[in-house]
């Protein structure tokens, strides 16, 4: 059976029986989403790589306790958010982290010119910086809903809060993000 | 709807998750309120900027690093796996199987009243020294008869009914298996030890041993009482050398025409009373020294073996022998015309202390009748 056709639940069952190859399937299936979520939560590529690796290894260690009451992806996201939030809080307590200019974000549109590329890059760095300045809970709900386009119900399960709370928290987080981006927009810079 | 109410619901309006009435109200307000219109544009741009954040590529070799670390980690076992692991550590599979078999046996035992009855019967017959009623004496006697003689139809029916009462399957094959397994070791040892000259005696000893074993297997193990020591048909087939010590020649009594007294139908005993003998002898066993001289080798070896085999029963007899000088009571049936021969043989083997008979009229009638005489022999210590 091809790895793509095996469900998460089947992989988890195989993994719980000791089949480590099933874990590799799960890693390859979820690594990109988890890494990007963690990266947007932390704003640092290396930190994101370290935390993402720890997320998967934590899941691997605790797979025996996973009883399948939720989707594996929901469970994995919860682990990732916990790790990222913990790292973010510890980092913010040491210093206010700025968005790294490490060039990890690839600009896909080859048709745009260098000036536009720079402007886009500057805008994205600004958005990332604004996200980093938000409360972790607000940044989390924005990233889950607006970046990853996860349904409200799944966000509620990941955060273990009611859907109504998710909506109200999302509205508050968006208003906070808008307020942080307002200076950029009010300076006459137009969104590309 | 005022500006504050509209701004609280702008996210829902952008996601079109509000009901139609609210959507229409907000649209109406936005068309007439430039401030709220600017707010909703700013919010929409903000959401779009987040949504347009590009997906970054994972580091090269990320999967391999994760898998390399994972292979060094031992997965935390599930609760079920922890339980199984604990069982494996503390209990090997053989022990677990034995425990399982034991549990199943207990469950089956509790569910099957038939098995419970059998177990109870075995337990009481081997352990509990229940008071013996005369009816049990009769049953025991009949069991011993059965092991050596073909049963009369009536006796056979009696036995079957007894078995049914006890729910013990009447399986002669299984009995013979038990007997043969017990006898095999004994017989082998005897054959190995015997010289050709002793082979005949050893053969007799084997037969005697078989008889005693059969008697032990056939009859329940109860405390020895005198009523059970009554000679029966099984004793008539004893080889020479009475294990109970009357003397070797007492075996001659078992020759025709004398035989131990099976309780025939015409002389059936009352279950609550001893039979009324036609003649009653009290004899004293002769000293062992003399008996040893007359006993043949097979008799001696058999007695030794019997004593070795039955320490419990032997020790059980001692108190009785000390308390009561009568160590054995044996019964014989003798044809009237052979009564005198019987008396002579008895006198040759033991000292006759007393001889009683029933009333003279009845004795004469018995001697003249065609029925066999019932003779009671009480054997005293030497």
Image: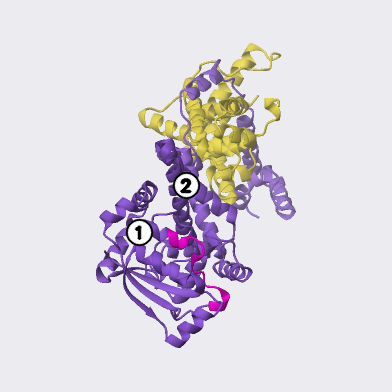
- Residue visible at 54% across and 67% down in the picture: B166
**Chain identifier of the residue bearing label 2 in the image:** B
What's the colour of chain A in the image?
Answer: yellow
Quarter location, residue A12: top right
Quarter location, residue B330: bottom left
What's the colour of chain B in the image?
Answer: purple
* Residue span colored magenta: B252-267
Whether residue B161 can be seen here: yes
* Colour scheme employed for the rendering of this structure: by chain
Give above or below for B177 relative to B322: above
Instruction: Report, in whole angstroms, how far the alpha carbon at label 1 lies from the one at label 2.
Output: 26 Å
Q: Which residue is mark 2?
A: B183
Q: Position of residue A142 (x, y in %)?
A: 57, 37
Q: Is residue B250 left or right of residue B20?
A: left
Helix, strand or loop under label 1: loop
Q: Which residue is mark 1?
A: B247
Where the N terminus of chain B falls, by quadrant?
bottom right
| Mark earlier in primary sequence (1, 2) | 2
Give above or below for B101 relative to B50: below
Where the C terminus of chain B falls, by quadrant?
bottom left
**Between A78 and B182, the one nearer to me in the picture:** B182
Quarter location, residue A10: top right
**Circle 1 Cα neighbour tier, 10 Å, few/some/many (<14 / 14–19 / ≥20):** many
Check residue B35 for magenta coloring. no
């Amino acid at each position: 059976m091809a790895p793509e056709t095996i469900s998460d639940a089947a992989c988890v069952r195989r993994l719980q029986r000791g089949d480590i190859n099933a874990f590799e399937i799960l890693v390859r299936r979820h690594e990109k989403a988890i890494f990007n979520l963690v990266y947007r939560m932390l704003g640092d590529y290396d930190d994101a790589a370290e935390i993402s690796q720890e997320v998967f290894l934590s899941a691997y260690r605790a797979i025996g306790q996973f009883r399948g009451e939720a989707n594996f992806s929901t469970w994995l996201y919860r682990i990732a958010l916990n790790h990222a939030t913990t790292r973010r809080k510890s980092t913010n307590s040491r210093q206010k982290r700025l968005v790294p200019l490490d060039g990890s974000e690839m600009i896909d549109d080859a048709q745009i010119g260098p000036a536009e590329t720079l402007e886009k890059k500057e805008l994205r760095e600004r958005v990332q910086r604004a996200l980093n300045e938000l409360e972790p809970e607000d940044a989390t709900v924005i990233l889950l809903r607006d970046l990853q386009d996860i349904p409200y119900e799944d966000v509620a399960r990941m955060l273990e809060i009611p859907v109504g709370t998710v909506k109200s928290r999302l509205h508050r987080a968006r208003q906070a993000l808008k307020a942080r981006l307002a200076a950029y927009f009010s300076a006459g810079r137009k969104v590309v | 709807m005022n500006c504050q109410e509209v701004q609280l619901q702008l996210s829902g309006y952008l996601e079109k998750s509000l009901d139609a009435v609210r959507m229409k109200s907000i649209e109406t307000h936005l068309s007439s309120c430039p401030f709220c219109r600017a707010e909703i544009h700013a919010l929409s741009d903000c959401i779009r900027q987040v949504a347009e954040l590009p997906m970054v590529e994972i580091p090269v070799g990320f999967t391999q690093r994760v898998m390399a670390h994972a292979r060094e980690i031992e997965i935390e076992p599930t609760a079920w796996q922890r339980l199984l692991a604990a069982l494996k550590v503390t209990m090997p599979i053989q022990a677990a199987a034995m425990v399982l078999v034991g549990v199943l046996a207990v469950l089956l035992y509790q569910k099957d009243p038939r098995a419970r009855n059998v177990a109870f019967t075995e337990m009481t017959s081997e352990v509990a020294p229940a008071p013996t009623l005369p009816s049990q004496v009769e049953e025991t006697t009949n069991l011993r008869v059965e092991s050596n003689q073909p049963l009369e139809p009536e006796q056979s029916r009696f036995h079957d009914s007894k078995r049914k009462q006890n729910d013990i399957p009447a399986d002669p094959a299984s009995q013979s298996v038990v007997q043969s397994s017990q006898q095999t070791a004994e017989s082998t040892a005897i054959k190995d030890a015997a010289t050709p000259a002793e082979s005949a005696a050893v053969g007799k000893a084997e037969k005697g041993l078989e008889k005693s074993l059969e008697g032990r297997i056939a009859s329940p193990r109860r405390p020895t009482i005198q009523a059970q020591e009554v000679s029966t048909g099984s004793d008539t087939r004893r080889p020479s050398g009475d294990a109970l010590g009357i003397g070797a020649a007492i075996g001659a009594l078992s020759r025709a025409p004398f035989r131990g007294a099976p309780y025939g139908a015409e002389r059936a005993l009352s279950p609550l009373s001893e039979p009324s003998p036609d003649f009653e002898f009290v004899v004293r066993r002769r000293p062992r020294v003399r008996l040893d001289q007359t006993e043949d080798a097979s008799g001696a070896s058999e007695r030794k073996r019997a004593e070795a085999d039955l320490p419990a029963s032997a020790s059980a007899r001692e108190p009785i022998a000390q308390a009561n000088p009568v160590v054995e009571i044996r019964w014989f049936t003798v044809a009237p015309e052979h009564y005198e021969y019987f008396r002579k043989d008895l006198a040759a083997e033991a000292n006759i202390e007393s001889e009683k008979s029933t009333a003279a009229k009845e004795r004469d009638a018995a001697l003249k009748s065609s029925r066999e005489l019932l003779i009671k022999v009480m054997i005293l210590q030497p």
